Amino acid sequence: KSTTQFTGTVGGTTALASLTTDATGTSSLRSVTTTGAQTYNDAVTLDGTYTGGTVTANAATTLAGATTVNAGTATFNGAVNGAQALTIAGTGTTQFNAAVGGTTALASLTTNAGATASFLNVSTTGAQTHGAATTLNGTYTTTNGAFTASGAATLAGDTTVNGGSSVLFSGTVDGAYALAVNNKSTTQFTGTVGGTTALASLTTDATGTSSLRSVTTTGAQTYNDAVTLNGTYTTTSGAFTANGATTLGGDTTVNGGSSVLFAGTVDGAQALVINSKGATQFTGTVGGTTALMSLTTDATGTSSLRNVTTTGAQTYNDAVTLNGTYATTSGAFTANGAATLAGDTTVNGGSSVLFAGTVDGAQALVINSKGATQFTGTVGGTTALASLTTDAGGTSSLRNVTTTGAQTYNDAVTL
């Protein structure tokens, strides 16, 4: 019922068959080797290396020094504390069923590749490095270190990662729960997120940067930091929001379950496709620094954009609100739905320009194109334009135009 201490190595020369302590009192050990089980039923203090078939700590564990556990199965049923490094070196199954570092943060926590590990809340002052396939549930804080999950990560509950430096998920991430990442540095997801089981939601904070490759959530995706996108981003019934600057690292498709918002700039020499039944908004310049390859919206919902530059086509299949300059270096500009001018608008078409729906709005519209410009719907029928001007290159074709100011057709025109 009192204190049990092993101040020398146990099983260092000849391994014990097993080692068991009862549930009363406390135990303190320095390095133990068994061929079978190590079972610590009392509060235990560890310091050194613990090798056995299984290692089980059923009560609170305190680390008095750097500790390595190398076992086929390791189970910590009580809290684990101590400002020391903990390494799980085995390739079997490890379970932490209580908080790790909740009272005294660990120096670091490392798991081995080829293993599986599950955790419930972990705090370290340094790095958390998981080579193992990892199950997460709770809050994972690395005050000054990196958080790395190299194996597949599964969310067993709502999960928050507070990264002291970088955060890296290099394997897949799955689980029908919310994931939030707070980090002042670089956050990277190099594997697919939600590919097997969609996450409930994914949120990043406003500091640092994030990079992701294909994400599926049933709810919202909210990127508050500067974000790099590459792949397909699907929110089944939630909003897609990028509040910081967005860079396209590859061809990108956003399938928005409700609204889609890019509140910052969007750049990158890649194709961007937006499919959404709700409102799609670009409130920052698109392609201002690096022109997009192309930009396409689907036929449902609405889109609103301010200044877009692409090397290829811009195709707006939904009702679109324009305000600013829209340049397609070598591609077509197409608005297949109704177009509304929210500000003076210029279209610099690299090839053809087509407004297949109505065009309205008390603003000036200028079309510069060396190809064919066509308005197949009424222009200014509901709200007269301020003016309409075409340049001297190419041709124009129009059906019914109303402006409060001038109409100036400098190219060959069909009326």
Image (tube, rainbow, N blue to C red):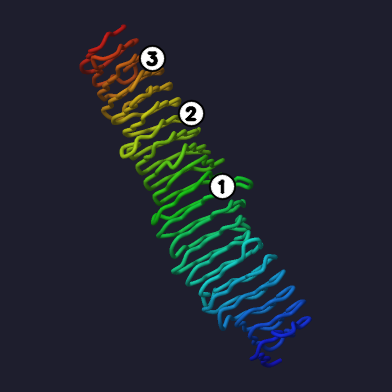
Relative vertical location of residue 415 with respect to residue 247 in this rendering, above or below = above
Q: Secondary structure at mark 2?
A: loop
Q: Tell me if mark 3 has few (under 14), some (14-19) or many (20+) residues whose alpha carbon lies within 10 angstroms of its own.
A: many
Earlier residue among tags 3 and 1: 1
Mark nearest the camera among 2 and 3 is: 2
Q: Nearer the viewer, residue 39 or 14?
A: 14
Could you say which disc has been placed on residue 192 in the image? 1
Earlier residue among tags 2 and 1: 1
Relative vertical location of residue 216 with respect to residue 59 in this rendering, above or below = above
Tell whether 164 sits left or right of 414: right
Tell whether 329 sits left or right of 108: left
Q: Tell me if mark 1 has few (under 14), some (14-19) or many (20+) residues whose alpha carbon lies within 10 angstroms of its own.
A: many
Earlier residue among tags 2 and 3: 2
Could you say which disc has been placed on residue 377 in the image? 3
x and y, in percent, of residue 402 in the image = 28, 14
Q: Residue furthest bottom?
A: 2
CA separation, marks 2 and 1? Answer: 24 Å
Q: Which residue is mark 2?
A: 298
Relative vertical location of residue 240 with respect to residue 344 in this rendering, above or below = below
Q: Tell me if mark 2 has few (under 14), some (14-19) or many (20+) residues whose alpha carbon lies within 10 angstroms of its own.
A: many
CA separation, marks 2 and 3? Answer: 19 Å
Tell whether 175 sits left or right of 146: right
Q: Secondary structure at mark 3?
A: loop
Q: Is the residue under label 3 in contact with that under label 2 (CB below 8 Å)? A: no
Q: Amino acid at mark 1?
A: Thr
Q: Residue furthest top?
A: 415
